Image (tube, grey):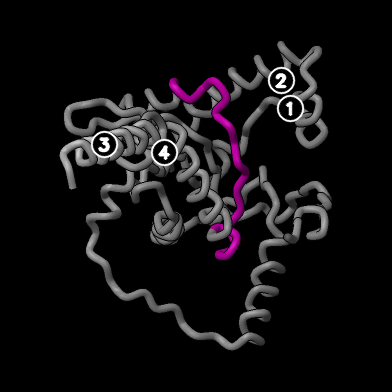
Amino acid sequence: MNKRVEKQMESKTKHKRADVADKLVGDEMVFTDLHENVIRERMIPYRMPVINDDLTLRNSQIFYEEMKMRRSCRQFSTRDVPLKLIQNLLKTAGTSPSVGNLQPWTFCVVSSDSIKTMIRKILEADERDNYVSRKKGASWVVDVSQLQDTWRRPYITDAPFVLVVCHEIFRDVNNKTERVFHYNQISTSIAVGILLAAIQNVGLSTVVTSPLNAGPDISRILRRPENETILLLLPLGYAAEDVMVPDLKRKPVEHITKLY
């Protein structure tokens, strides 16, 4: 092979490498970096229990019937909830997948009456502003008011526990601050979904509560680090015996499924 041909091939190789490098610029590069932890993990055999088709179908139906009973509960019993039960629920949530196995979530378990009272006051002040002061012309407020016509949040102090779900919005990697808000929000939301199923499984109840604009103030009360933000709050306990919930109708599976 003459030198001219060698130079041409070398030039093509350089351009090809440059094209590949360009494709890794931006979010894709961040995504690749987040997977470094997974790549370095030791690999182990993966074994799932073998279940016959009939039992699999039966189990799926039982699980659906159980989850079908789930409702957002705003009235709680005074019945004690063992802390060990809460720990098992959070361990279950912690099995959730996360980008790069970063596991960016933190579940703050609040049982202190004084802290719950402070959180409630902050939430109510913020939600009063959103649901009352800005009610005129805000269509989303009207939608919410169909299910809930008050800005008061007594369930924050009535529930035995309040879980404040946080996630990282940035982290320091190699002395460089990297923003990972988008991926971590998705990962933590998936963990919350698993947590909601676990809560239903043990007979407890909750209501997903948005912090709205009160997140920073709640973070300060809980002394959370600056690289965290609050995703949502979950008051947690047994439902009160006389609790009433909306008779919601879920969309049929045909309306939420597309087969290809």
Of pointers 4 and 1, the one earlier in the residue sequence:
4
Q: Using a 10 Å C-alpha cutoff, classify the residue at mark 2 as few (fewer than 14 neighbours), some (14 to 19) or many (20 or more).
A: many
Q: Residue 182: x, y in percent?
A: 46, 34
Which residue, given by chain and number where applicable, does mark 2 sit on? Answer: 131
Q: Are marks 3 and 2 in contact (CB under 8 Å)?
A: no
Q: Using a 10 Å C-alpha cutoff, classify the residue at mark 3 as few (fewer than 14 neighbours), some (14 to 19) or many (20 or more).
A: few
Which label sits on residue 112?
4
Q: Nearer the viewer, mark 3 or mark 2?
A: 3
Which residue, given by chain and number where applicable, does mark 1 sit on? Answer: 150
Three-letter residue code for mark 3: Gln
Quarter-of-image position of residue 48:
bottom left
**Residue at 57% across, 53% down:** 196
Quarter-of-image position of residue 197:
bottom right
Describe the element under mark 2 as helix, strand or loop. helix
Which residue, given by chain and number where applicable, does mark 3 sit on? Answer: 8
Of pointers 3 and 1, the one earlier in the residue sequence:
3
Image: 174 above or below 258: above
- Viewed as shown, does residue 111 lie left or right of 251? left
Q: Are marks 1 and 2 in contact (CB under 8 Å)?
A: yes
Three-letter residue code for mark 4: Ser
